[in-house]
Image (spheres, rainbow, N blue to C red):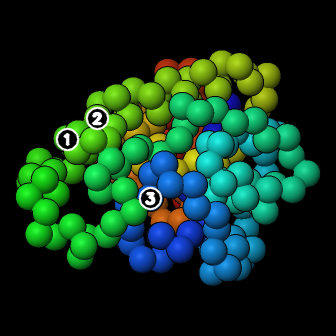
Amino acid sequence: MTINFIRHGKTAGNLEKRYIGRTDEPLCDAGINELRSIAYPDCELVVASPMKRCLQTAVLIYPDKKIVTYTELRECYFGDFEGKNHVELSENPDYRKWLDNGGLGAFPNGENSAVFRARSVNGFLKAVEENKTANTISFVVHGGTIMCILEKLAVPHMEFYDFMTENGHGYVTVYDGKSIKIIDRI
């Protein structure tokens, strides 16, 4: 099965480099324009996070395709860091501790990294299982969600942050039921 992983287009929060997890921001004009300038691979079905930015991206890229949503594919909830950027958090001791931990620990009053990773992978596996008759599926989701799935299932194995991708971009992959092989970038 071919799986296209596409990170949603830019939002105002992305332009300001804010931690935007559960904040349900729409795409900004720059994000919409950028999406329109990229050639995306075709697919039979679109799977998306239910967040506005993902649904808007999915409709812009695939206006005539069926879109199904999975709540498990939402971005991580950044808790106390939600809506803030690095500059605003630079003196926050919890933020410094989180950075010192490689950005992998729990967010204060937010979602635990391990829970987020498991949720994202389980959402992917559920979506693939429930739509296994499709030969090509495009997942229009969040950067963190893509990183979780690929860190767990991509071969050769790489670390979480190695799979970071820009807004509107992503990966063309092949999933064999056990692992994911990246064959191209979007």
Residue position for label 1? 105
**CA distance for labels 1 and 3:** 17 Å
**CA distance for labels 2 and 1:** 6 Å
State the SS at label 3. Answer: loop
The quadrant of the image that shows the N terminus is top right
State the SS at label 1. Answer: loop
Q: Residue at x 91, y 51 (%)?
A: 64
Dot placed on the residue nearer the N-terminal end, 2 or 1:
1
Q: Percent x, y for residue 118?
A: 39, 26
Residues at marks 3 and 2 touching, judged by CB atoms closer than 8 Å: no
Q: Residues within 10 Å of mark 3 (few under 14, many from 20)?
A: many
Q: In this image, 82 relative to 136: left or right?
A: left
The quadrant of the image that shows the C terminus is bottom right
User: Would residue 93 be seen by someone viewing this image from the given angle?
Assistant: yes
Image mark for residue 20: 3
Dot placed on the residue nearer the N-terminal end, 1 or 3:
3
